[in-house]
């Protein structure tokens, strides 16, 4: 069993700029996933918290927190939530409630583990994009 609520080491240092880059990237992937499923393109990151929190955890470290309605990250002692402004999160009375036992439920463990291969692919692609953008920026090529 993976304890997602434990602090994980970062592959990339967290910053507000990188948060914005991650949000754009994950939204793009969320839209691609909708196209694969032949459903309407999303207008925001509603419904993506499992993927988004796994992604942020794999890239920026920290821990995953949440409850049956929503999950998010704690990175460097602060709440970090890619879908903080999504319609579904806005409708939750207490979106940042943390129920650690929720992550020990076998079905929740299986659900997160089933998402992990896709998320790891996203992470590899994101890290390549970030590296490429930083190389272009440092060489003066925009």
Image (cartoon, grey):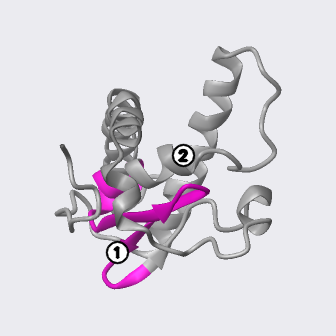
Q: CA distance from mark 2 to mark 1?
A: 19 Å
Name the residue: 40% across, 36% down: 107
Indicate whether 2 appears above or below 69.
Answer: above
Foreground: disc 2 or disc 1? 1
Camera-nearest residue between 107 and 85: 107
Residue 128 shows up from this direction:
yes
Quickly name the residue at label 2. 25
| Residue 53 position within the rendered picture, expressed as x and y whole percent measured from the top left | 45, 55
> In the rendered image, which quarter is residue 39 located in?
top right
Residue positioned most to the bottom: 77
Tell me the SS state at disc 2.
Answer: helix
Q: Is residue 65 magenta?
A: yes
Task: Answer left or right for 61 relative to 71.
Answer: left
The one nearer the camera, 14 or 48, is: 48
Q: Residues within 10 Å of mark 2 (few under 14, many from 20)?
A: some
Measured as percent of width and height from the top left, residue 24 is found at: 60, 51
Which numbered dot is residue 75? 1
Give the class, few, some or many, for how many residues have Cα within 10 Å of label 1's Cα (few <14, many ≥20): many
Q: Secondary structure at mark 1?
A: strand
> How many marks overall?
2
Magenta span: 55-78
Quarter the N terminus occupies: top left
Left or right: residue 46 versus residue 97 is right
- Residue sitting at x 22%, y 62%: 10
Whether residue 133 is visible here, answered yes or no, is no
Residue 102 pos. (x, y %): 41, 56
């Amino acid at each position: 069993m993976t304890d997602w609520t434990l602090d994980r080491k970062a592959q990339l240092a967290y910053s507000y700029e990188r948060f914005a880059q991650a949000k754009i990237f994950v939204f793009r992937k969320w839209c691609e996933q909708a196209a694969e499923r032949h459903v309407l393109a999303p207008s925001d990151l509603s419904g993506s918290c499992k993927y988004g929190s796994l992604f942020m955890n794999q890239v920026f470290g920290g821990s995953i927190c949440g409850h049956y309605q929503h999950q998010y990250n704690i990175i460097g002692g602060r709440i970090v939530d890619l879908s903080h402004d999504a319609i579904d999160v806005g409708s939750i009375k207490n979106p940042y409630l943390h129920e650690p036992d929720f992550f020990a439920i076998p079905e929740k463990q299986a659900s997160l583990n089933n998402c992990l291969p896709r998320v790891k692919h996203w992470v590899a692609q994101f890290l390549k994009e970030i590296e490429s953008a930083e190389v272009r920026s440092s060489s003066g090529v925009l």
